[in-house]
C-alpha cells in the first residue's frame, strides 16, 4: 500500500473512536476534532472550536498544567503520555499524549479518554 493513502486511514481511526479526540498544535490551536468531540463540545461551539485556542476552554490552573505538560513533552522524545486526572462521574481516566513527526520532533498533543466500564454488548453482535 502506498504511504500516500495512510492519512485517510489514520483519520478514519480517530473518527471511529467513540471518545472525544481534540488535536492541538504547539500553539494550543485546535486543529481537528473527531465527530465524538464535536458532539461532546456542541454547547461550547462544537466544530466551531477548530481554529480556536484550547486554553480559552480551560481555567487558569488547567492552562498552566497544560503548559507544564507541553514543557515535559519537549524535554525528551520518550516523554509521550501522562496521566492527568480521573473523572469518577464518567468512570474514565484522562491522559495527555504527545504527537511527534517522523524525526521525533514534538508537533502537538491531544487528550486521551479511557473509559473503564465493561462492554455491555454481546461479542460479535452483528444485529
Image (spheres, grey):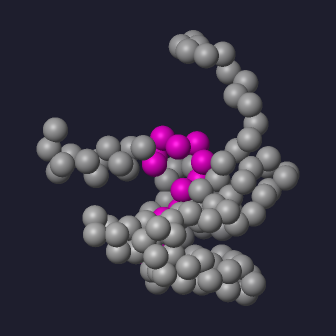
Whether residue 56 is visible: no
Q: Single out the residue that lies furthest toward the left.
A: 2
Q: In which quarter of the image is residue 13?
A: top left
| Quadrant assignment for the N terminus | top left
| Quadrant assignment for the C terminus | top right
Q: In which quarter of the image is residue 9?
A: top left
Whether residue 59 is visible: yes
Residue found 51% across the figure and 69% down from its top: 79
What x and y, as percent, mark residue 70?
54, 79
Span shown in magenta: 14-25
Question: Which one is nearer the viewer's eye here, 43 or 116?
Answer: 116
Question: How many callouts does the rendering have?
Answer: 0
| 110 left or right of 68 in image | left
What x and y, as percent, mark residue 111?
58, 62
The reply to whether the magenta stretch includes residue 62 is no
Residue found 46% across the figure and 46% down from its top: 15
| 84 left or right of 12 in image | right
Residue found 66% across the figure and 16% down from its top: 122
Question: Which one is nearer the viewer's eye here, 75 or 86?
Answer: 75
Residue found 51% across the figure and 65% down from its top: 80
Question: Which one is nearer the viewer's eye here, 82 or 127?
Answer: 82
What x and y, as percent, mark residue 93?
72, 54
Residue 122 vs 97, above or below: the answer is above
Amino acid at each position: 500500500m502506498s504511504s500516500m493513502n495512510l492519512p485517510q486511514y489514520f483519520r478514519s481511526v480517530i473518527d471511529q473512536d467513540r471518545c472525544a479526540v481534540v488535536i492541538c498544535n504547539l500553539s494550543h490551536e485546535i486543529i481537528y476534532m473527531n465527530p465524538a468531540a464535536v458532539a461532546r463540545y456542541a454547547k461550547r461551539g462544537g466544530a466551531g472550536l477548530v481554529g480556536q485556542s484550547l486554553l480559552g476552554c480551560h481555567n487558569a490552573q488547567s492552562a498552566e498544567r497544560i503548559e507544564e505538560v507541553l514543557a515535559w513533552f519537549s524535554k525528551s522524545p520518550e516523554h509521550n503520555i501522562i496521566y492527568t486526572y480521573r473523572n469518577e462521574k464518567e468512570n474514565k481516566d484522562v491522559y495527555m499524549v504527545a504527537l511527534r513527526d517522523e524525526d521525533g520532533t514534538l508537533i502537538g498533543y491531544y487528550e486521551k479518554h479511557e473509559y473503564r466500564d465493561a462492554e455491555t454488548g454481546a461479542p460479535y453482535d452483528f444485529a
